[in-house]
Image: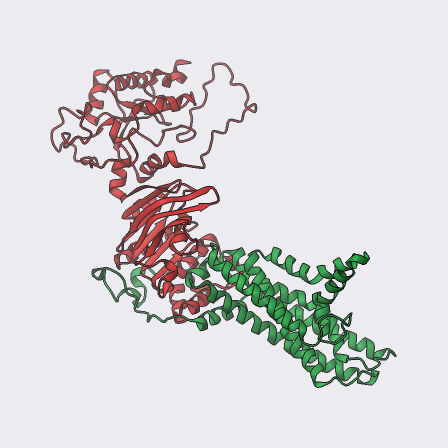
Chain colours: A red, B green
Amino acid sequence: MIEAVGLTKRYGDKTAVYNLSFQVRPGAVTGFLGPNGSGKSTTMRMILGLDNPTSGQVTIGGFPYRKLPNAPRQVGALLDAKAVHGGRSARSHLLSLAQLSGIPARRVDEVLGVVGLQDVARKRSKGFSLGMGQRLGIAAALLGDPQVLLFDEPVNGLDPEGILWVRNLMKALAAEGRTVFVSSHLMSEMALTADHLIVIGRGQLLSDMSVRDFISANSADFARVRTPDTEPQLREKLTSALTEAGGHVLPEQDGGLRVTGLPLPRISDIAHDTDVRLWELSPHQASLEEAYMRMTQGAVDYRSTIDQKAGLMQPVPPGAQPPMPVPGQGQPGWYAPPSPAQGGQPFAMGQPPANPYGAPNPYAAPAAPDGAVPGPYGPPTPVAPQTPPQPPQDAPPAADAAPAAPASAPTPDLTKPEDAR
Amino acid sequence: MSTPQLPMPPAAAPNWQAANGPSYGGYTSPIPVVRTHLGHALASEWTKIKSVRSTIWTLGVFVVLVLGIGLLAAVVVSNSSSEMNGENPLSLGFFGLLLGLMCIITLGVLTTASEYGTGMIRTTMTACPSRARVLAAKSIVFFAVAFVVTLVTTSFIAFVDASLLKDNGAKDPSAGEWLKGTLGVSLYIALLGLLSLIVGSIIRHSAGAITIMIGAVLAPLVVALFMFSQSLENVRQALFEYSIPNQLSVFYSNSLSESGPSGWDPLWIIVGVTAVAFAGAVALLEKRDV
C-alpha cells in the first residue's frame, strides 16, 4: 500500500508536483499516467525517498521509504533502465545490489533466469539493447521479492514478446497480492494491464478511478459513417443533414465521417430520409487512449505545432486541392469527441432515462426498444468527470486558429475542398 | 532478437510465488529477511569496485608509474658517477608517486561520481536508504584498496632503490625513515584518494571533481610561482610549504623548505581535512535529492 498525502515538490519556482494525494492498493495493477513533464518520475522518486518532498508525505505500509525496515525487501523499483554502470556485467550489478540488501547470491541467478538474461549475465551492460536494459532493470526490481513494486515505463524498448511477458508479469505479481504501480505512455498496454488508473497533469491529480470508469467518464463513443466514395456530394448532403439533426460530424481522412451526438438508428433514418446510401455505419467504442487524450489535453506541456514550412512551399497551382490534413496533426479536438456531459448519451439505446445531467436528453433514441442493440454501448455510467464539463462552444473558436481543421465540422466550411472544385 | 531465450513466464518461476495466495491480502516473500548493516554495504562496494575496468586501469597505471619512474631514477643515478652524499635513497620514489597520485585521485572520484553519471546511485540508494552507510562503505573499501596497493608498490620500490644506491654513497635509512617512506606515504596517498572520493560525492560529476582535485594538487605551486611581490612573501611561502607535492616530499625528508610541516605533520593535516570533508559530504548527502 502506497499512500501519498498532499505531496508537493518544488524545484526553485517550478512546481513539479502539487498537492498530490492518492492511494495505491495491493492486489491490483495501478497505472500511473500523465503527459511528459507532468511529474510522474518525480512522484516515483519521492515514493522511494530519493527526493524529499517540499511538503506533504508519501508512505509505504505506513512508513516513509527511508524509515522503512528492510526497505529493499519490501519495495522493488525500476526507475530508469539506464541507471546501471555500463562497465559492469549484469550479474555483478545484481550481485552488488543483492549483497547490499542482504539477499542470498543464488537469488541473482534466479532473477536473471526470470527475465531471460542468463546467457548474457557476464556481458557488460554497456552493450545491452534498450530492451535488455529494461529486463535488467526489472530483474533488479524483482531481486528482493518485494511486496510493493514500482515500474517507470517498463515496456520501453521491449520486443512484442517482451511486452506480453511484462504484461503477464504485472498481472501475476498483482494476483499474488502485491502492490504494483506502473507508469507508461502506451495506452493500449495500460488498457490491457492496469485495473486502476491514477492520472496526473502539471503535477496535479486529474483522476483516480478504475480503467472502465475512466474511459466512460472521459470519452464519448461515436459512430463511423461512410458514404459511397464515388459520390462526394452525398457526403456533404449527409453531413449537413446530420448537423441539422443535432449531431457533431468530424471528417476522417479516408472519407468517412465520425458522428457523435446521434444514435445509430437515427443516423440510418436520416440517411434514408435524405436519400443517401451508406457503405458503413459502425459503432466505435472510445479507447483508453482517446479518453486519456481528452482528459489531459489541457495539461500537456510539450505539444507539437504544425510544420508550416513557411516560405518554403511551392504555390499551389490553381485548381489543385490542398491536401487533406492527417488526423491528429494540429487539429485541436481530434481526440476529443464531445464529452458525455455536453452531448448527452449519444448511443444510449438501453436505458435512456437515467440522465445524470438533469436536462432532458434530446438525442436519446426515441423508438429504440430496450436491448435492441446490446453491443458495446452499455448504459452510461453516471460518473461525473473530474474535469468541469466544457461548454460546447469551446470547439469552434479553437478551430478558427486552423482554418483547415475539420473540428469546425458543424459549419459548412468543412466541405471547402469539394466546394472549390 | 535481443534475447535468444524465451523468458520464463511468471507462472513457471521458482518457489517465490507459490508461498502465499492472494487471499493473504499482502504478499510475504519466502526468502528470509536479514537486517542489513555496514557489512552488507562493504561486500556490495567490494563487488562494485572489482567489477569495473577503471579500477584495474587506474591502479595498473599507478603501479607502472611508481615502479617505472622509481626504478629508472635509481638505475640512472647508480650508473652515473654522481654521489648521493649521504642522502635518503628512498626519496627517489617521490617522482613516480607524484605522477601516480593522479591515478589514485581519478579512481577515488570515479568511485562515487560515476554512480551519479550513470544514474546507478538511484538504484543504490533505493536498495540502501541509509545514505551515510553507502558513503562509509565506499570510503572504507576504496581506502583499503588504495592503501594496500600503494603500500606494496612503495615498499617494493623503496627496497629496490635502497639496495641499488648503496654503492653511490646514500645513507642507510633509519627505521623512522623507512616507516615514513612506505607506510607514511601510503596512508597519505590513500587519504588523498579518499578526499577525492568525498569531493566526487559532493560535486557528483567526474570531470569536475577530477579537475578540482588535480587543481588542488598543482595550483598552490603554480600560484606561488607568480607571487613575486615582497608583501606576498609569507603567502608564497605558505603555499609552497603546504602544497601537496611538498607535503608528500616531507615524508622523504627532502622538503623544499625548513620551516613548513615536518615529520608526520602532512598526515595529520590530510586526516583533518578528510574528516571535515566527510562530515560535510554526509550532511549534503542526507539533505540533497539523489
Count of numbered circles in the view: 0
Q: Front-most of A137 and A238?
A: A137
Of B203 and A337, nearer the camera is B203
Q: Give how far across and how far down residue A386 sits, in percent.
A: 28, 37
Place residue A20 in its image quadrant. Answer: top left
Rendering coords of residue A355 (x, y %):
17, 30
Give the quarter of the image for residue B20.
bottom left
- State whether residue B269 appears in this view: yes
**Looking at the image, which residue sits at the far right?**
B81
Q: Is residue B277 above or below residue A282?
A: below
User: Residue B18 appears at what percent x and percent y?
Assistant: 26, 65
**Residue A197, picture quadrant:** top left
Residue A326, placed above or below residue A213: above
Q: Is residue B133 left or right of residue B168?
A: left
Q: Residue at x 14, y 27 (%)?
A: A368
Where residue B145 appears, as percent x and y from the top left, is 58, 73
Q: Residue at x 48, y 71 (%)?
A: B42
